[in-house]
Image: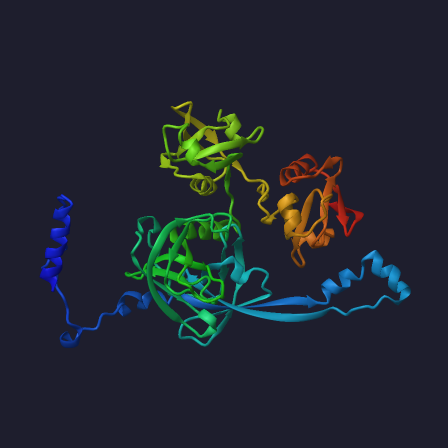
Amino acid sequence: MNKIISLSLFTALSLFGASVTLEQMPQDSQRIDATTSNVIISYHNAIKESKKSVVNIATTKKTKQNEQLNELMQNPFFKEFFGNRMPEFRQQERKSHSLGSGVIISKDGYIVTNNHVVEGADEIVITLPNDEKEYKAKVIGEDPKTDLAVVKIDATNLHVAKFGDSSNLLEGDLVFAIGNPFGVGETITQGIISALNKSNVGLNQYENFIQTDASINPGNSGGALVDSRGALIGINSAILSRSGGNNGIGFAIPSNMVQKIASSLIENGKVERGFMGVSIADLTKDLKELYDNKQGAVILMIEKNSPAEKGGLQVSDLILEVDGVKIKNANELKNTIAAITPDKSVNITYERDKKIKNTKIKLAKMDSEILTSSDGKSTSSSIEGLSLVEINAQTRKQYQLSKESEGLLVTEVKEDSKAEKIGFRQGDVIIQIEQMRISSLHDFTNALKEYKNSKKRVIINRQNYRSILVMP
């Protein structure tokens, strides 16, 4: 049968006058007959040590019931309707529980996990593999921008994960996801690397994901993604799924990023990022015609007195390299600059008017956690516990705001945070700080800088009534 097929293919090619040499795989490849060789293919020895460094994380969070109902009853309409007969609702505390995973990175108890696993938790309990003892953990540092966090338990001589170099990964590499899905206990799933350097997924602010088809389910978050040697190459973070189950599209934070963030959190309790002061974009098809280089990040805007302005960069410059590291797109530039220590000088290679130029700039410290956003996504602010979003046509529709609404919408106020103590509530609209009108996150940042040495009066719109808050 094989000969007939081969002859037919040759004839078809000849009829059309084709002359094609088709490359064939070598015929001397060794084949193992599993039914007769008595061979079992196993990766047990490769990953048995890695399993010992993956822990289970159980968290408890206290939430208050009737909080939203009490806030609704403060509306002037309800007050007028009920008069002195306003009902009072007692605050009731309710405990919610969740499960996740983590990876031991030091013998004395430092554990890296996803920030969303431990964020806002009142109690964190760690269980080690094959050990029924429960360890209370404390948060050392959190970085919501990469969804990483470090916690610590009081223990010694723990089994530590061995980091692999995620920059050497290739699509098709065999990988294993280790974690605690659905709370069933330690589980290992196998797959391959489906894609690398995935960004614009919309999960984190700084993204450079490893995509894998190894099954990652709820509870796997914070667990290990290891290669066929058992080396830690990523921290499992999220899945894309309409049903909540595994659809073969999982994402892990690469080990090189994990090492940098975890080290910074352990040493400083926070992550300090370099700051250029530019807004950037990828090269579009039309823009590529205007540049000799077809990869890089185009500068759209430069902040006044920023490192970029002081270094002589201009709008429309195409950034090609940072300290010799090639920049393929805007996301790579953002991640590269953010990974550099503030106050460090870096060499920037860029294209302007089809000429290659170089400049040296000294990165500033990102004083505020605010990043301008007009896409409807909330961003954390420099006020601890306060999340804001700019009001525009898109966000008016998304949050069902009136056409007249202007300013910054408070999308979240974390319990017991600085923002809550100031008096902010979810749904407030910030419209002015002292004498400065607020219409963007950039305005908010400038106002905080302008009045940084004094208390600030913040004018807000709360349920169509103006109020004043005092911010230290």
* Residue at horizontal 37 percent and vertical 33 percent from the top: 294
Q: Residue furthest front?
A: 15
Q: Where is residue 462? Give x, y as percent.
A: 76, 51
Q: Is residue 185 left or right of residue 58?
A: left
Please indicate, yes or no, whether residue 165 appears anywhere in the rendered image. Answer: yes
Q: Position of residue 300 (x, y in %)?
A: 52, 32
Left/right of residue 203 with respect to residue 81 in the rendered view: left
Nearer-the-camera pick, 320 or 346: 320
The residue sitting at 46% across, 49% down in the picture is 207
Image height of 243 relative to 303, above or below: below
Residue situated in front as seen by the camera: 71 or 421? 71
The answer to which image quadrant residue 88 occupies is: bottom right
* Residue 395 percent location from the top left of the image: 63, 47
Say which residue appears at 28% left-offset and 70% top-offset: 44
Spot occupied by residue 236 in the image (x, y as percentages of width and height):
42, 60
Q: Residue at x 68, y 48 (%)?
A: 409
Q: Is residue 57 left or right of residue 325?
A: right
**Between 125 and 312, the one nearer to me in the picture:** 312
Q: Is residue 32 above or below residue 466?
A: below
Is residue 24 something that shows in the picture?
no
Q: Quadrant of residue 109?
A: bottom left
